Amino acid sequence: MVAVFLLAGWPVYRLTRPAASVVTANSSPVAATTTDSPETKSAPLELEAVFAPAPADFQLKNLDRTALAGRGPQARFTGRWTTAVPPEGVDLVVQAHWSTVTAGSSNAAAPAANPAAAQVTVRFPDGRKVEKSFWAGENGTVDEVFTVPGEPAAATP
Amino acid sequence: MMHPFSRTFFAVLAAGLGGVGLASAAPLKVASLSTVLSDVARNVGGDKIQVEELVKGGVDPHEFQPSPSDVQLVADANLVLVSGKGMEGYLSKLEEGTDPKKFVNVGNKVGNSLKLKDDGKTIEDPHWWHSVANVKKATDVVRDALVAAAPADKDALTANAVAYQGKLDELDQAIKLKVAELARDKRKLVTSHDAFQYFARDYGFKIYPIEGVSTAEEPSTRKVAELLTTIKKEGVKSVFFENLQNPKVITQITKETGATVGGELYADGLGAPGSDATTYIGMLRHNANTIVDALK
Ligand SMILES: [Zn+2]
């Protein structure tokens, strides 16, 4: 993951060391709880979303439920989301908007800005962790799907 | 339905029609045995090519057999786009009567095959176009073939391919977001024949086909009975029929299981003129929307 960031010019330091402009918040602006289905047990998942730069707003959604949401100037958000995780996994829709940042296409008249990006991490109670990075499109938004696997074998150690 | 063409017929007819050349300014003649590849070729080739569709929208490619006029189109063509992975059982006969080098087996070049058990044999699943990633690769294959045949048009063909692949990326993202409206443990798809395994692999579905890989097979009574049990056990909400199939068995299933008819899917290629699946992108959008809206 880090190698990918380096190759692509991702400002890794902004994800690993909060800069002066990045406020760390450990409270969850929105946390949702779902009901169990007969076949699956609920699990309290720890969600983390880190942005560079801070987004205008973002949300992580599963079906019609919001799992985590917030707005800038914070750049890091965490929260607990309790949900049923079937063996097939769950999909999180990741939506983020940046008000002043566009995609990292270079401009001949000015130095290219770093592209806006988000990294979402999901931690299971048993220590499993899955994460994925998303880059803003040309319109300065992310609108993508992050599949959280239900099978332990498919998770990142 | 099989047409009684012999190898001799193909060879004699093509020999009489072969050797047709084109002035360099004329558009490249591209014959296509796949509705999806016709659409890809039109997007990449633009006004640099003239696409001759042997298999037209709404025609079942499993059952298709070339007519004498189709053989002439192949003989006249500079390139012939082949769906591949075993879809065209008549291909060797068609190749025999003309220059085999002008055949581009796109599906085989795309690779990334799924293997299926069909009638006790392991075969390649020929329905590769239900993966958008595969169609992006097919776009590269078609571009390379067109550039090789018309090197002077390389820049335009390359730009067209890039633009089309951008649209395919948008399509893939739109399907992922649409499918995310459906819980992953509800992604169970009962279809007329086994055509959606690539879609299932890319978007997290499990397929319960009524028939096998080819539309030529009729489902056995035992197979239908097994399927009825599965639909009830898995709580499948809706079942789907196809634009080229008789929905009789689907009707029986809905009566006996309580599942609803989810709608019509395009399994084997683009729809007939006037349908909402006259382009590849339209077809995939229709299928994803129909499936998700019915199973939600
Ligand atoms: Zn088929």
Image (cartoon, coloured by chain):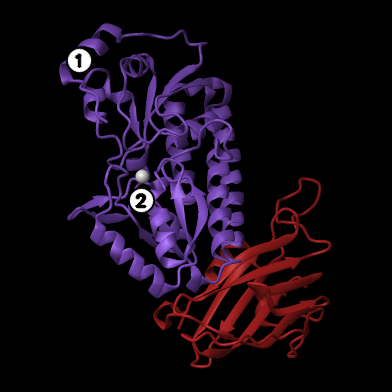
Chain colours: A red, B purple
- Residue that label 1 marks: B9
Q: Which residue in the rendered view is the most extreme toward the front?
A: B255
Mark 2, secondary structure of its residue:
loop
The quadrant in which residue B295 appears is bottom right
Classify mark 1: residues with Cα within 10 Å, few (<14), some (14-19) or many (20+). Answer: some
For the point 71% across and 86% down, which residue is it?
A31
Relative image position of residue A43 (x, y in whole percent): 55, 90
Q: Alpha carbon of mark 1 to alpha carbon of mark 2: how far?
A: 33 Å
Query: Toward the viewer: A27 or A43?
Result: A43
* Quarter placement of the C terminus of chain B: bottom right
**Does dot 1 land on a helix, a strand or a loop?**
helix
- Locate residue B156, reporting x and y percent: 58, 28
Report the residue at 27% width, 60% height from top.
Answer: B223
Please give the chain letter of the residue carrying mark 2: B
Instruction: Kindly tell me whether residue A147 is visible in this rendering.
Output: yes
Q: Is mark 2 within 8 Å of ligand 1?
A: yes
The image shows residue A53, relative to residue B11, as above or below, that is below
Residue at screen point 73% across, 81% down: A76
Name which residue lies at 51% across and 33% down. Answer: B272
**Mark 2 nearby-residue class (10 Å; few <14, some 14–19, many ≥20):** many
Q: Is residue A128 above or below residue A149?
A: below
Q: Is residue A11 visible?
A: no
Ligand 1 lies in quarter: top left
Q: Is tag 1's residue or tag 2's residue first in the polypeptide sequence?
A: 1
Percent coordinates x, y for residue B294 in the rendering: 56, 60
In the picture, which quadrant includes the N terminus of chain B? top left
Q: Which disc is residue B193 wearing? A: 2
